[in-house]
Amino acid sequence: MTATHRDDRQAVIDVIATLVDAWRRNDADAYGAAFTEDATYVTFVGTYYRGRTDIVDSHRTLFAKYLKHTQLADEILDIRFLCPDTAVVTGRGDSYKGTRPTKLTKVQTYTLVRETTGDWRVAAFQNTKRKPLMEAISFKTAPDLIPAAQR
């Protein structure tokens, strides 16, 4: 791994860490600052937000109501650079109060881009709720569905 690639990888990890920290503080403005102006954001319930303002406004409401005093658990599974200025991060995550959960129930995909300023920001985010029981049934009845990394 080259020094530049290592630096970019760390910069991408730092963006995710910034999101986790902003969530911990329930700071919608800081959370939204990690996204591009025209970012897209899909929640695990399927709600689609477009643009940093929409993301900030929705999180301001979420942090004041449903997600008040929650934290964000995040686990990066993979970082792939599609080109020097675009990275795809796949991970698991969950919001929680109290003790951090050991099993994270959502699979998340972040697409990050390097802006002309050199800063990395999230351009697209997708959050999917895992269905472990359905996954286990499908793997048992059709073993070819098991991802290669889990075989």
Image: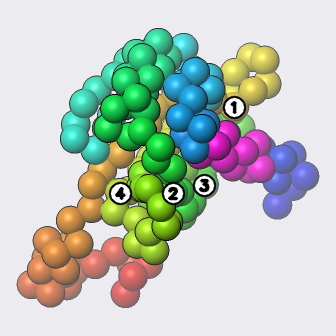
Looking at the image, residue 36 sits to the left or right of residue 149; the answer is: right
* Quarter of the figure with the N terminus: bottom right
**Mark 2 vs 3, N-terminal side:** 2
Kind of residue indicated by mark 1: Trp
For residue 12, which quarter of the picture? Answer: top right
Which residue is painted at 47% across and 20% down in the image?
Answer: 56
In the image as oriented, which residue stretches furthest toward the left? 141
Q: Amino acid at mark 3?
A: Ile
Q: Position of residue 7 (x, y in %)?
A: 84, 47
Question: Magenta segment range?
Answer: 9-21
User: Left of 17 or right of it: where is 8?
Assistant: right
Q: Secondary structure at mark 4?
A: strand
Q: Main secondary structure of the magenta part?
A: helix
Q: Is residue 96 visible?
A: yes
Q: CA distance from mark 4 to mark 3?
A: 17 Å
Q: Nearer the viewer, residue 96 or 6?
A: 96
**Alpha carbons under labels 4 and 2: distance apart:** 10 Å
What residue is shown with label 4?
A: 106
Q: CA distance from mark 1 to mark 3?
A: 14 Å
Nearest to N terminus: mark 1 or mark 4? 4
Q: What residue is disc 1 on?
A: 120
Question: Mark 2: which secondary structure?
Answer: strand
Neighbour class for label 1 at 10 Å: few (<14), some, many (≥20)?
many
The residue depicted at 79 percent of the width and 25 percent of the height is 118
- Kind of residue at disc 2: Ala
